[in-house]
Image: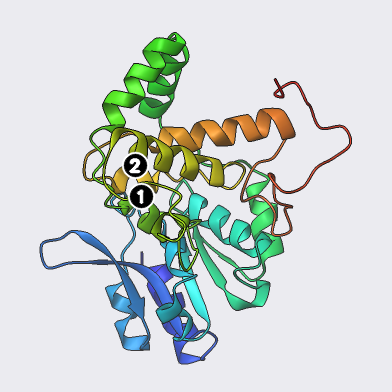
């Protein structure tokens, strides 16, 4: 995409930004994240159907922050990530320049987060059909069948935490699962420990997940764990009207309340 490359080069030459976070190719033609800091290296940027990683995960990294002000090549889900991170005080409106790419592959530059919000009013990236199909299948299961399904899937988990590492909303410097005094969740990969980890993570992402599906793609065991956060997001929307990543000032779903909130989930 020449338009993207040219604009990245201009921004770096003018020192409007200090680094462009985007996609590049490896020697075997696979896609990786690249951090372009020199104008002449902007030619390394690529964008096509292979570019699925949510690059928003790098915005909160200590090493990346030290580069200076970033511009980020952003798919629709990455745009949502930027807005959600701003609402959680992790990035500032003037601290990130969004180089957006629409679902149709059109390049759009967003000078402010407000312009990103306006764009997001057109709609969010739909959940892939295969994920919707599996979610619908799980919904038709009885409670026992659903329990058996997730027990079978989660027993494959090796606690590698690739899901956590790939998620742009899992940005805590130290996750509670890494604490051993007190130890909240079992460290080894066990039936109960795996269940505790994935349920805890899904709850921590309720009302915060931008439905990028990155955790599921990152899982080496191919566990559809992204469906847990998709479902948590669906419930947050149904119960509280909360949709993550549409506003840079969105209040926290699980730590704020309204007098007219539904209470029918309380048993």
Q: Which residue is drawn at 78% across and 26% down?
A: 263
The image position of residue 165, as x and y in percent, is: 36, 58
Q: Is residue 56 above or below residue 158?
A: below
Q: In this view, does 211 lie above or below 4?
A: above
Q: Which of 79 and 85 is in front in this view?
A: 85
Which residue has dot 1 on it?
Answer: 163
Pick out the residue farthest to the front.
Answer: 181
Pick out the residue farthest to the right.
Answer: 259
Q: Is residue 70 above or below residue 161?
A: below
Asked if the residue under mark 2 is in contact with the one under mark 1, i.e. CB atoms within 8 Å, the reply is: yes
Sequence-first tag of 1 and 2 = 1
46 relative to 259 in the view: left or right: left
Disc 2 crowd rating (10 Å Cα; few below 14, some 14-19, many 20+) is: many
Which residue has dot 2 on it?
Answer: 216
Q: Marks 1 and 2: which is nearer the front?
A: 1
The image position of residue 252, as x and y in percent, is: 70, 51
Q: Is residue 127 visible?
A: no
189 relative to 199 in the view: left or right: left
Pick out the residue farthest to the left.
Answer: 28
Res. 142 image quadrant: top left
Q: Can residue 139 be seen in this view?
A: yes
Q: Quadrant of the N terminus?
A: bottom left
The image position of residue 75, as x and y in percent, is: 46, 54
Circle 2: element type: helix
Q: Which of 193 and 217 is in front in this view?
A: 193
Q: How many labels does the image show?
A: 2
Q: In this view, does 90 lie above or below 159?
A: below
The image position of residue 171, as x and y in percent, is: 49, 63
Q: Residue at x 33, y 20 (%)?
A: 149
Q: Residue at x 64, y 64 (%)?
A: 86
Q: Which of 259 and 119 is in front in this view?
A: 259
Q: Residue at x 51, y 84 (%)?
A: 17
């Amino acid at each position: 995409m020449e338009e993207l490359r040219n604009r990245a080069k201009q921004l770096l030459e003018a020192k409007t930004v200090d680094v462009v976070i985007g996609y590049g190719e490896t020697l075997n033609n696979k896609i990786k994240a690249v951090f372009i800091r020199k104008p002449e290296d902007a030619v390394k940027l690529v964008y096509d159907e292979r570019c699925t990683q949510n690059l928003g995960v790098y915005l909160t990294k200590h090493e990346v922050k030290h580069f200076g002000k970033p511009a980020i090549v952003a798919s629709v889900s990455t745009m949502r990530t930027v807005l959600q991170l701003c609402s959680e005080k992790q990035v500032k409106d003037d601290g990130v320049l969004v180089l957006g790419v629409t679902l149709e592959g059109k390049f759009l530059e967003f000078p402010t987060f407000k312009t990103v919000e306006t764009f997001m009013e057109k709609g969010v990236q739909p959940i892939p059909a295969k994920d919707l199909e599996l979610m619908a299948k799980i919904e038709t299961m009885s409670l026992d069948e659903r329990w058996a399904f997730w027990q079978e899937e989660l027993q494959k988990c090796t606690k590698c935490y690739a899901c956590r590492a790939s998620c742009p909303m899992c940005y805590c410097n130290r996750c509670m699962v890494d604490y051993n005094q007190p130890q909240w969740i079992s460290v080894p990969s066990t039936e109960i420990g795996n269940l505790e980890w994935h349920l805890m993570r899904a709850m921590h992402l309720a009302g915060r997940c931008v439905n990028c599906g990155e955790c599921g793609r990152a899982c080496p065991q191919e566990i559809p764990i992204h469906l847990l956060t998709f479902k948590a997001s669906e419930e947050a929307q149904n119960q509280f009207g909360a949709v993550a990543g549409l506003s840079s000032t969105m209040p926290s779903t699980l730590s704020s309340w309204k007098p007219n909130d539904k209470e029918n989930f309380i048993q």
